Image (cartoon, helix red, strand yellow):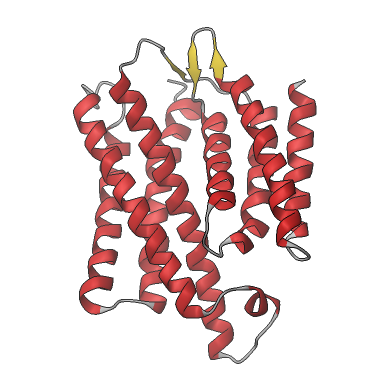
């Protein structure tokens, strides 16, 4: 059953990404089916009798599902990002199906820890979308300055709209990241005993990067290449905080 769901979701994600070239409506239909099957697959892989399995590849798959869902639900013109994000979700499903990792979150965990995890996943997902948005923005800016309008230029919204969307997503992701850090400090009793100190430090550094970017945009009107560099740097540090820590703990140290 899991293999059938995995293959079906992968095919639908790839088909949805390809269909974006032709039709937004087909993208929404195929993408909706892919996200639905992905959700069912996550339920089967993550919900166990011992608790919630948030192993390394399950966590990657969960985050790509959340990214796909946010992309489909967004009222902003960001559907072109599906051309890149949906194949990444398909790859995450394939990796999760092939590799088995286990990190059980006990059902006895208090609600605050669950809330912290939820804030973290949504924040990471939004800031991942904003990082890809920044890359598209960089490419769009490059084409404009070199007077090479291609397919990307024709499909993307105007540069000013792209920048506005970028800062909207970063601001929302920053709020959720703030809630994630606050809930972590409140509900995680001993981050040193739980090997979470590196994740906490790097997440705090990423929070500072996004805070400086938003302040610079508000105070000095930072935009263009400056905004792109800061947003991608913050994303890199944030991904290193979460997935870097999980990679070392689960796959290398096997804790």
Q: Residue sitting at 26 percent across and 32 percent down? A: 184
Q: Residue sitting at 61 percent across and 53 percent down? A: 85
Residue lying at the far bottom in this picture: please name it. 147
**205 or 50, which lies in front?**
50
**58 vs 44: above or below:** below
If the image is split into quadrants, where does the C terminus sit?
top left
Measured from the top left, where is residue 19 in percent x and y? 77, 58
Q: Is residue 49 left or right of residue 184?
A: right
**20 vs 193: above or below:** below
Quarter of the figure with residue 231? bottom left
**56 or 162, which lies in front?**
162
Quarter of the figure with residue 99? top right
Q: Is residue 119 left or right of residue 191?
A: right
Q: Residue sitting at 64 percent across and 44 percent down? A: 89
Residue lying at the far top in this picture: please name it. 49
**121 vs 130: above or below:** above
Measured from the top left, where is residue 182 in percent x and y? 22, 37
């Amino acid at each position: 059953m899991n293999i059938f769901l995995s293959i079906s979701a992968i095919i639908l994600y790839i088909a949805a990404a390809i269909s974006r070239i032709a039709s937004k409506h087909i993208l929404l239909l195929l993408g909706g089916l892919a996200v639905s099957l992905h959700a069912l697959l996550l339920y089967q892989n993550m919900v166990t009798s011992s608790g919630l399995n948030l192993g390394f590849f399950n966590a990657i798959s969960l985050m790509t599902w959340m990214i796909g869902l946010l992309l489909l639900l967004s009222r902003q013109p960001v559907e072109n990002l599906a051309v890149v994000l949906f194949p990444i979700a398909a790859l995450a499903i394939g990796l999760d199906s092939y590799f088995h990792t286990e990190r059980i979150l006990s059902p006895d965990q208090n609600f605050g820890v669950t809330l912290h995890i939820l804030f973290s996943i949504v924040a990471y997902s939004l800031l991942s979308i904003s990082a890809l948005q920044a890359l598209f923005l960089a490419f769009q800016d490059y084409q404009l300055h070199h007077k090479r309008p291609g397919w990307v230029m024709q499909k993307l919204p105007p540069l000013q709209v792209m920048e506005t969307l970028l800062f909207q997503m970063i601001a929302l992701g920053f709020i959720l990241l703030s809630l994630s850090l606050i809930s972590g400090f409140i509900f995680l009793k001993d981050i040193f005993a739980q090997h979470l100190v590196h994740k906490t430090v790097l997440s705090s550094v990423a929070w500072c990067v996004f805070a400086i970017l938003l302040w610079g945009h508000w105070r000095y009107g930072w935009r263009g290449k400056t905004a792109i560099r800061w947003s991608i740097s913050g994303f890199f540090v944030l991904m290193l905080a979460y997935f870097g820590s999980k990679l070392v703990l689960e796959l290398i140290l096997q804790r």
